[in-house]
Image (cartoon, grey):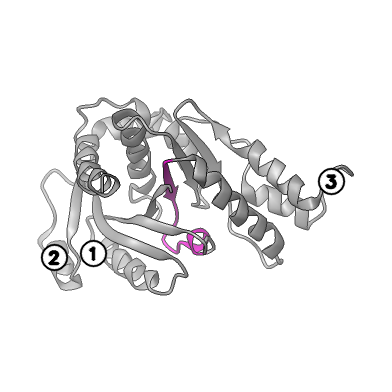
Amino acid sequence: MSYTIAMAGKGGTGKSTTATLIIRYITQELGKAVLAVDADPNSSLGISLGVDVKGTIADIREDVVEKRVEIPASMSKARYIEYCIEDCIVEESKFDLLTMGRPEGPKCYCYANNILRKYLDKAEQSYPFIVIDTEAGMEHLSRRTTNDVDLLIIAFEATIIGVHTAKRITELIVSLPIKIKEVIYVMCKVPKKGVNEKVEAEISKSGFEISAKLPFDDEIFEHITSGESLLEISKENAVYSEIRNLMDKFVLVSTDK
């Protein structure tokens, strides 16, 4: 079975950056293949990974529901959707990327979603690790009702708003129709002068423990600004070092059991 890591958090917190560096850790440090799933409507994981995304699951659903495409007579609708899903997966040497795209509109997508879910169930057997970058509301994740999440990482900024967002995501988790084995909290973009006292007090009041504090980093900022892959940052990078320590603690220990 695959070991599934899911990211959750507000846009702009550093969630996709964290997901990308986790993928780097798994592929480079552990030497394992990863199925990366970009389930955030902003679809920024591909940019962070340095790959060109040409199609999304949302595009496939729209085409099928709106009957914008003619399904070949030799194919069933289900097989055609599977073919389109396979076609929009970006295959790299150490990881594959599947991009979900924008959330569904008011139309009924149940049929296409069921096929997608079955396809993912089957595809995930081929990957030792799955890393999912989702949004704060985790709508895409909540539709994957046949799968468990081994490690959910809630990413948030070192602000009062960031702490409140993390609390809201924590409350949302109990309503999701999936099993989450472990939840941890990662504070991103921590300023050099440290965390504000009011923020520290709010964290204490919230009751959750911070597993890692990722500093604001100039090298990462330059890569994001120029659109360069975050897989290319230096191995000694302070943020990557923190993520490596975090993954050694949670992923290595869990997968070695």
Residue 221 horizontal side relative to residue 193, left or right = right
| Of marks 3 and 2, the one in the foreground | 3
Residue 2: percent from the left, percent from the top? Answer: 42, 47
Please identify the quarter of the rendering in which residue 158 is found.
Answer: bottom left
Q: Residues within 10 Å of mark 2 (few under 14, many from 20)?
A: few
Tell me if residue 89 is in the magenta stretch: no
Reading the image, the residue beneath label 2 is 198
Q: Which residues are magenta?
A: 128-142
Residue 190: percent from the left, percent from the top? Answer: 19, 48
Reading the image, the residue beneath label 3 is 71
- Residue type beneath disc 3: Ile
- Residue type beneath disc 2: Lys
| Label 1: element kind | helix
Tell me, yes or no, whether the two marked residues, 2 and 1, touch with CB atoms within 8 Å.
Answer: yes
Reading the image, the residue beneath label 1 is 160
| Of marks 3 and 1, the one in the foreground | 3
